[in-house]
């Protein structure tokens, strides 16, 4: 069923984790799924090839869409990391040989979001206790709880709002496409 492009509410993205899903436009198997939500509550799933065909007539919009989908993927990765258990959070670089580490993303890069870097809630207590650097005076449990509370208070909510903003913006890009490729 094809609905008017003006009825698009948001566009989300995810990678199918189980069996490959089917594109609602061409019925091909897809792993990278663009879930397009319409104002009437219907959700249609498209693969990247169909999205590129839809955006094909407008190369500027396709470039803008691809740039923002990369940002959406990155922010969803960050949110998954912040929402997971602390012992599974990837570690990034060590902070000046202090036993403190940044939180890494799924590619091993230090997470930088909302104007700052994020210290991992777990640290090397013995290494941190010596040296001319920042020394944690809290117990490892207190330090971890403070870090997690800070992520929850300040950063997770901002990530959720940025993800929603990007999903709405991606919908706006699709609405701007005048005609859909057949």
Image (spheres, helix red, strand yellow):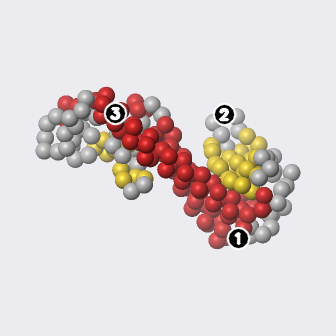
Task: Indicate left or right for 101 with 41 as reference.
Answer: left
**Residue 96 appearing in the image:** yes
Q: CA distance from mark 2 to mark 3?
A: 33 Å
- Residue designated by label 3: 144
Residue 2 locus on image (x, y percent) = 85, 55
**Residue placed farthest to the right in the image?**
1
Counting residues from the N terminus, which is met first, the one under dot 2 or under dot 1?
Answer: 2
Report the residue marked by disc 2: 18
Who's the residue at 25% across and 29% down the image? 139
Helix or strand or loop: what does disc 3 sit on? helix
Question: Pointer 1: what residue?
Answer: 58
For numbered disc 2, what is the local secondary structure? loop
Which residue shows up at 66% across the image and 33% down it? 18
Residue sitting at x 38%, y 42%: 150
Q: Position of residue 15 (x, y in %)?
A: 63, 43
N-terminal-most mark, 2 or 3: 2
């Amino acid at each position: 069923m094809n609905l008017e492009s003006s009825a698009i509410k948001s566009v989300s993205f995810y990678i199918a984790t189980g069996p490959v899903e089917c594109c609602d436009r061409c019925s091909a198997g897809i792993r990278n799924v663009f879930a397009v939500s319409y104002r009437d509550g219907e959700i249609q799933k498209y693969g990247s090839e169909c999205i590129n065909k839809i955006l094909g007539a407008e190369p500027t919009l396709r470039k803008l869409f691809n740039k923002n989908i990369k940002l959406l993927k990155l922010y969803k990765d960050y949110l998954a990391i912040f929402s997971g258990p602390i012992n599974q959070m990837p570690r990034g670089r060590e902070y000046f040989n202090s036993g403190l580490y940044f939180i890494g993303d799924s590619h091993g890069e230090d997470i930088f979001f909302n104007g700052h870097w994020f210290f991992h809630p777990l640290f090397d207590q013995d290494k941190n206790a010596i040296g001319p650097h920042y020394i944690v005076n809290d117990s490892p449990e207190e330090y971890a709880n403070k870090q997690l509370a800070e992520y929850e208070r300040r950063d997770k909510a901002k990530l959720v709002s940025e993800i929603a903003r990007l999903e709405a913006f991606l919908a706006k890009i699709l609405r701007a496409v005048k005609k859909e490729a057949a």
